[in-house]
Amino acid sequence: MIRAAVIGSTGYAGIELVRLLSQHPDVELTAFTSTSYVDQPLNEVYPQFGKQLNSLCVAEDWEKLVSSNDVLFCALPHGHVAEKLQPHFLEKVKVIDLGADFRLPEASTYETWYNLPHPQPSLLLEAVYGIPEWNRKLVSSTRLLANPGCYPTATLLGLLPLVNADLIDVSTIVVDAKSGVSGAGRGLSLDRLFTECHESVKAYGVGSHRHTPEIESSLSTITGVSIPPISFTPHLIPMHRGILSTIYAKLKSSSTDLEVIESLYQAAYEKEPFVRVLPKDIFPETRYVKGSNRCDINFKIDFRTGRIVVVSAIDNLIKGAAGQAIQNMNCMFNLAETMGLEAVPAFI
């Protein structure tokens, strides 16, 4: 059994980790940490666990957690994990960080976008960005895994086949993405109150969202293509969970046809258990991936403009966070990637 602890277990991503890991046949959950609910039983904080999980939430004690676990899942705000994680810890335990601390390859980029000097820049050289459909070998051999952000996951899975095949002009990439409110976390904020976001849609982080450099750097690292600045605009949708990413780019050749691109996507994903390329003219919807680790993708060529439009959908809390973290863990421990993640999406 893999001994696992969840650091930051009572946020939205953290509690999804607990829920999924508690059903994983090869995982023993040893600890749930929390800053807000120390010494409270987890099933009182989240009553849906009933009698299944009645252990107490505990305070963070990294030395103890490192010495008593095989893997630490960290669901904390940016800056916290890099501050606490000492390089020698990785000699004893694998770390999967669901935050942003190890997603960017350069400390200077992190400081620019997160307004914080990176606490452990040397670890950036060791960290692996965990999108296993595209870098499974690196994921399987790392001790420090940077779990991708939710918007980048949906966007990268949609874009990578095209960039890797050199079919689009990368200077023309525009990403219009929409997320449910859970993507903003569980903390109290005026703009996330029900009466503030219900019956309204809004753009936010326009021209400045922190997932922008993550998308750019990951596209470049995985494909080896130099990626210029992209246009990325996220939107808040009044629903609980889900991300829909609509991606636009100019095709390099006006003669590129649907059959070529269909073959490209099928070759990329036909053996991937969590990525589904939909039939012609059926486009992804968040309700068809809700509660699952799936990503649905489809595309269409707009011959009038010479652009391709790619649409992808994920559950932001699962494929965009907890589920992908477990998929990466399975890879890191040489387990079947689907283990603990076989649930069919919940339609309603």
Image (cartoon, rainbow, N blue to C red):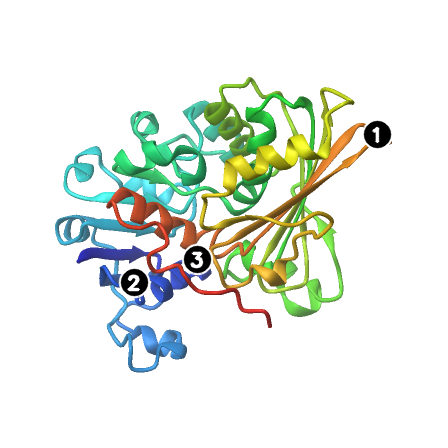
Q: CA distance from mark 2 to mark 3?
A: 16 Å
**Disc 2 marks which amino acid?**
His
Q: Is residue 46 left or right of residue 347?
A: left
Q: Is residue 130 left or right of residue 248?
A: left
The answer to the question of whether label 3 and label 1 lie on touching residues, with beta carbons closer than 8 A, is no
Q: Residue at point 70% right, 53% down?
A: 282
Residue at image mark 2: 24
Residue at image mark 1: 305
Residue at image mark 3: 13
Among the two numbered marks 2 and 3 on one chain, the one whose residue lies closer to the N terminus: 3
| In this view, 246 is above or below 18 | above
Q: Nearer the viewer, residue 182 or 40?
A: 182
Among the two numbered marks 2 and 1 on one chain, the one whose residue lies closer to the N terminus: 2
Q: Residue at point 17% right, 48% down?
A: 66
Give the percent coordinates (x, y) of residue 274. Answer: 47, 50
**Disc 3 marks which amino acid?**
Ala
Q: Quarter of the image containing the C terminus?
A: bottom right
Among the two numbered marks 3 and 1 on one chain, the one whose residue lies closer to the N terminus: 3
Q: Nearer the viewer, residue 301 or 109?
A: 301
Q: CA distance from mark 3 to mark 1?
A: 39 Å
Secondary structure category for the residue under label 3: helix
Residue 8 visible, this orientation: yes
Query: Residue at the bottom extreme?
Result: 51
| In this view, 97 is above or below 19 | above
Secondary structure category for the residue under label 2: loop
Q: Nearer the viewer, residue 279 or 162?
A: 279
Give the percent coordinates (x, y) of residue 346. Answer: 54, 69
- Mark 2 vs mark 3: give the one in front: 2
Crowding at dot 1, Cα within 10 Å, few <14 / some 14-19 / many 20+, comes out as few
